[in-house]
Image (spheres, rainbow, N blue to C red):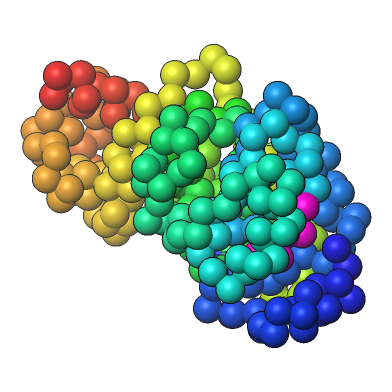
Amino acid sequence: MNKQEVLSILDEFGFQAKKSLGQNFLCNEEVIGDILDLAQLDKTTTCLEIGPGLGALSEKAVLSAGTYVAVEIDTRFQPRLTKVIEGNGGKVVYKDYLALQKEDLPDPSFAPEVILSNLPYYVMTPIMLKVMKDFPSCQKMVYMVEEEALDRIMAKPKTKQYGPLSVVTELFGKKRKCFTVDSGSFYPAPNTLSAVIEITADEEREWDPGIIDFTESAFALRRKTLVNSLSSSGKYSKDAIVSALKALGKKETVRTEELLPTEIMRLYEILSSEKG
Ligand code: SAM
């Protein structure tokens, strides 16, 4: 899909991009092709796309994947997506992904191996975290993100950007920045540079989605110690957290941003096993 096609689809259906829904449509064939190459879809693959928009990625992805489902918040795209997705054997669920429940899917046992999304930037973090909760068996995620978010995903301990997104993606698998995308590759053009990233599940690890809420609680009060932040969730007592930290060889005054993702995971395991 190029800029001319995006403009003519918008014109045909008589709508304009909604900034409030993060609608920046891809209009660079080369970038679209490179993203689909990363997704490596074939007839054995089950794929979920979040926010198909006008179908820049979907029109080819639906033809390559075995099972293809998309979740789109904006019902205005229904006539267009009925043609490009449903007309080619895929399914579209019109719903805010953040409110999506298993029962909303065409098949509640749907377990996508590949997640594809040119993410709406205003809800990027909650969508990425929810995907890792909803689909623990997912093998690969290919996302378009804004550069500022990329820094948070890749951040290392003891930095300002280090937080739940860096920790949880690190624990989920291997993450890699694949390439940068300039703003001219979208219509309308966003204010920032974007990047395509790939997160591949680590076969060795046992993924427990409970780590997501735990990590968010541990970072909830960033200026406080880990003990104060985590205990404010009401799930663990200060005493239990202090003794779990001691087992890890950490002081009770430690801040969450000082811990490695694997140390946060270990803390979660100790505290969960105590709760029994
Ligand atoms: N995939 C298309 C492309 O690459 O051109 C559109 C990408 S655009 C950056 C983001 C898309 O996500 C839009 O279609 C927007 O309507 C949709 N969207 C925004 N918020 C959403 C949400 N909470 N749940 C599902 N879709 C959402």
Q: Per the image, is 125 magenta?
A: no
Q: Position of residue 105 (x, y in %)?
A: 46, 44
Q: Nearer the viewer, residue 263 or 26?
A: 26
Q: Residue at x 90, y 55 (%)?
A: 30
Check the picture and name the quadrant holding the C terminus.
top left
Can residue 25 be seen here? The reply is yes
Q: Position of residue 120 (x, y in %)?
A: 58, 64
Q: Is residue 25 left or right of residue 106?
A: right
Q: Position of residue 155 (x, y in %)?
A: 56, 48
Q: Which image quadrant is residue 263 in?
A: top left
Q: Quadrant of ligand 1?
A: bottom right
Task: Report the span colored magenta.
Answer: 53-59
Q: Residue at x 24, y 29 (%)?
A: 245
Q: Is residue 131 left or right of residue 15?
A: left
Farthest residue to the top: give it. 204
Q: Is residue 138 left or right of residue 15?
A: left
Q: Nearer the viewer, residue 195 or 123?
A: 123
Give the tally of numbered discs.
0
Q: Per the image, is 57 magenta?
A: yes
Q: Main secondary structure of the magenta part?
A: loop
